[in-house]
Image (cartoon, grey):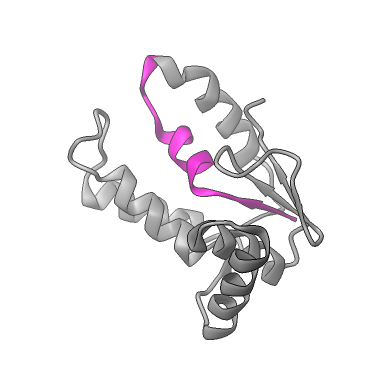
């Protein structure tokens, strides 16, 4: 299973002409069936998709409907165990807490890959490898 980071979901809804190629790649990624994500990703997606300064901002209802739709995939909840694992990963690898939480959510779901533009492409975090699908 592959863990899909927030940026992939956001590119999938983008109508910005300069993001058209990334939107096509994101659509291909999201057509797969063996994907996972986390509550953190759902939250980040909602906040960024509805941001008033976003040129193609979604309404609350549109973003909520998408969040519900994305929940058809396995979603890793935020737990104390996940948070403390993320804190340890943050310390070990020098990541931000939020990036470490993505890595640990992927691990908790049994994903061996995180699809993300934000983390270092090819980096392996103790068995969870980052792949930038837009490269």
Judged from this view, the residue extending furthest toward the left is 52
Residue 119 colored in magenta in the image: no
Judged from this view, the residue extending furthest toward the bottom is 80
Residue 10 colored in magenta in the image: yes
Q: How many tags in the picture?
A: 0
The quadrant where residue 74 appears: bottom right
Of residues 68 and 89, the one nearer the viewer is 89
Judged from this view, the residue extending furthest toward the right is 127
Quadrant that contains the N terminus: bottom right
Residue 15 in picture, x, y percent from top left: 36, 24
Of residues 62 and 44, the one nearer the viewer is 44
Residue 95 vertical position relative to residue 7 in the rendered view, above or below: below
Of residues 37 and 99, the one nearer the viewer is 99
Quadrant that contains the C terminus: top right
Identified at 36% across, 21% down, the residue is 16
Identified at 38% across, 60% down, the residue is 43
Residue 49 in picture, x, y percent from top left: 32, 43
Residue 62 in picture, x, y percent from top left: 29, 47
Judged from this view, the residue extending furthest toward the top is 17
The quadrant where residue 82 appears: bottom right
Residue 64 vertical position relative to residue 53 in the rendered view, above or below: below
Residue 85 in picture, x, y percent from top left: 63, 76
Q: Which residues are magenta?
A: 1-17
Identified at 39% across, 29% down, the residue is 14
């Amino acid at each position: 299973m592959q863990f899909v980071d927030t940026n992939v979901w956001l590119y999938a809804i983008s109508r910005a002409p300069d993001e058209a190629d990334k939107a096509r790649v994101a659509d291909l990624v999201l057509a797969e069936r063996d994907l996972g994500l986390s509550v953190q990703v759902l939250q980040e997606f909602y906040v960024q998709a509805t941001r008033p300064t976003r040129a193609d901002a979604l309404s609350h209802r549109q973003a909520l409907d998408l969040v519900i739709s994305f929940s058809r995939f396995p979603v890793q909840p935020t737990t104390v165990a996940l948070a403390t694992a993320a804190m340890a990963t943050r310390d070990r690898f020098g990541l931000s807490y939020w990036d470490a939480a993505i890595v640990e959510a992927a691990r908790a779901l049994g994903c061996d890959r995180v699809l993300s533009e934000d983390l270092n492409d090819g980096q392996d975090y103790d068995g969870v490898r980052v792949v930038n699908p837009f490269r």
